Structure formats: structure tokens, C-alpha cells
Amino acid sequence: MPWLQLHCDADAVSAEALSDALMEAGALSAGIEDADAGTPEETPQFAEPGMDIAAAWEHSRVVALFEADADPGAVLAACCAELGLPTPAFTLENVAEQNWVQLTQSQFDPIRVSDRLWIVPSWHESPAPDAINLILDPGMAFGTGSHPTTRLCLEWLERHATTGASLLDYGCGSGILAIAAARLGASPVSGVDIDPQAVSAAQANAERNNVVAHFADSREPIAGQFDILIANILANPLKALAPALASHVRPGGKLALSGILVEQEEEMMAIYSPWFAMSVADRREGWVCLEGSRL
């Protein structure tokens, strides 16, 4: 069945309230986008738990989806009246019924990390059959290679995951980093995550890629020390986990941390400096990958 999609502009103060009101008034979905997306004024927003960030952009766009027989303009007017807002100009767009599986798959193409390393959805042929091809589909667990932090970590692993090096992927998500490390020669390879769905997804992805890797719940005790520990999570948990992560890296071993904003790098390096000689490995799109050598 077709749908109607409403678009209207709003400021940062009213956008969230208007989006919520439209949902309560019968919209099938409602969200907020950057009205300046695709222009030089586009404003990326990065955040994690504990960080203050605006709820919306100063120039926001509210997008709401309705049944085909709804009157979105009337719903918008009623919501604005309830909120004490003037009714903004809006546009309506017909959204045709589609094969959503096919559409979703069409949005994910193979990702080139380097000439040597590619990430390939299972429905695609690899553009580089002789490269290391990681077969990974978009799913519920984080990490399909499209995010800058994942790319930074994969590039770091290409330089450091030497044959026979033991590795722990802390916060493994989809398992992409552990799987890449195993394909690059690291062994044994382990991964842990606090999310049981991530642990299951990572194990399934490892089997799909014919690699041997062990994945477990990070709340269970982790035994031993590793030649390499990589953690692509967020700055706040990385701060709290510093002593624990350091305890799992052997003397002379390597550490890679990402999920860190560029403005957080100095603080993070200072936190880890009692255990590691820290430096910046690379930066991309406002994110940084830090590396350290265990003292």
C-alpha cells in the first residue's frame, strides 16, 4: 500500500515537540533531520551517554509518514495549535509500496578498506576476489564497516595484526574487527560484548567467514593477557575500563582505541598513559583512533 510523507521545517526548540505530537496524532513514524543536509551548512552531531547535545538542529526538518487516506495537513495544523505554534509550510510526497528487502540491500555495496581488505554483503559479488573479503550483512549488532571508527580500526589491524598474535576485541559488536584480525593471521582471537545479541551475531559471522574466534559476554571474567587489544566503543566506557583493559595486554603488547571524538583524544591518552605509551594512529571525520604500547 502507498503512504503519504509530510515534510516541514522547524527550529531546534519546537522540532522535537512537533515530532512527538505528530506521532501521538496518528503518524506512522516521525523524525527530525538536518534541514541543511547536503549543503555547506550541514551540521554533524556526535554524542554518547553523558554528553550534552542539542535535541535537534537549529534548522531542522520534521518528516512524518501517514496512511494514504490521512489528511497530514490537518493533523499538522491541529498539532501546532495544541503546541501554540504557527502552522509551517509543508510538502507532501507519495511513498509507493516497495520491496523493502531489495531496497535495503541496494543501499549496501561492498566497502573497500584497502586493496587487500574488503567488506562484502552476502548478496554481492566481490569486486576483488583475490583480496581478503569479509562477508558481513547489516544487522542488529554494531559494525558493518561504514562508520569512520570501524574503518580506522580495520586499517590499524592491517598494520598490526601479525600472524600468530593473540587478540581481544573488546565490545565486538558484529565481530568485524575480530574476524578481520583472524583473516589477517592473528590467533587465537577472542571477542566480548555486553549485548547477548552482539555475541550471537559475532559468532554467526565468524562461522560465515570460516574463521576460528571465541565470543563471550564481557560481564564474565576474561582470562589471560593478549598481544593486541582493540576496543571500538565510546569514550565514557573507555575511561572507566582503562585499568581492566590494561590488565589484559601483555608487556610490550599493543592497544587500539576508537569511538573517540577528536576533542576527547588528549584526555583519553592521559588516562591510559600510566600503562601505555600513547599516540594518535589516525583521524577521520571528527573521530580518532588511538594506539598504545604496553609499558
Image (cartoon, grey):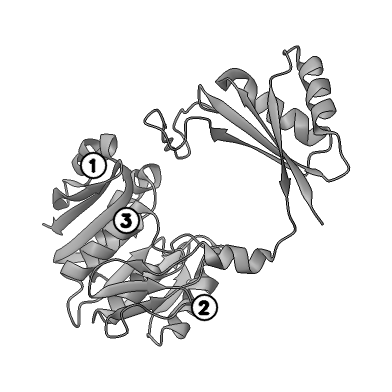
Identify which residue is drawn at 26% across, 39% down.
262
Which of these two is toward me, 222 or 230?
A: 230
The quarter of the rendered structure image containing the C terminus is bottom left
Count the labels in the image. 3
Asked which secondary structure carries label 1, the reply is helix
Q: Nearer the viewer, mark 3 or mark 2?
A: 2
Identify which residue is drawn at 37% across, 85% down.
211
Which of these two is toward me, 104 or 174?
A: 104
Asked which secondary structure carries label 2, the reply is loop
Amino acid type indicated by mark 1 = Ile
Q: Nearer the viewer, mark 1 or mark 3?
A: 1
Apparent side of residue 143 relative to residue 160 in the rendered image (left or right) = right
Residue pointed to by mark 1: 271
Residue pointed to by mark 2: 123
Asked which secondary structure carries label 3, the reply is helix
Amino acid type indicated by mark 2 = Trp
Q: Could you say where residue 90 lies in the image, as x and y percent from the top left?
A: 69, 27
User: Where is 214 relative to 27, above or below?
Assistant: below
Identify which residue is drawn at 41% across, 83% down.
209
User: Where is 255 relative to 93, above or below?
Assistant: below
Q: Earlier in the sequence, mark 2 or mark 1?
A: 2
- Are there few (<14), some (14-19), or many (20+) residues within 10 Å of tag 2? some
Marks 2 and 1, how far apart in space? 43 Å
Marks 1 and 3, how far apart in space? 12 Å
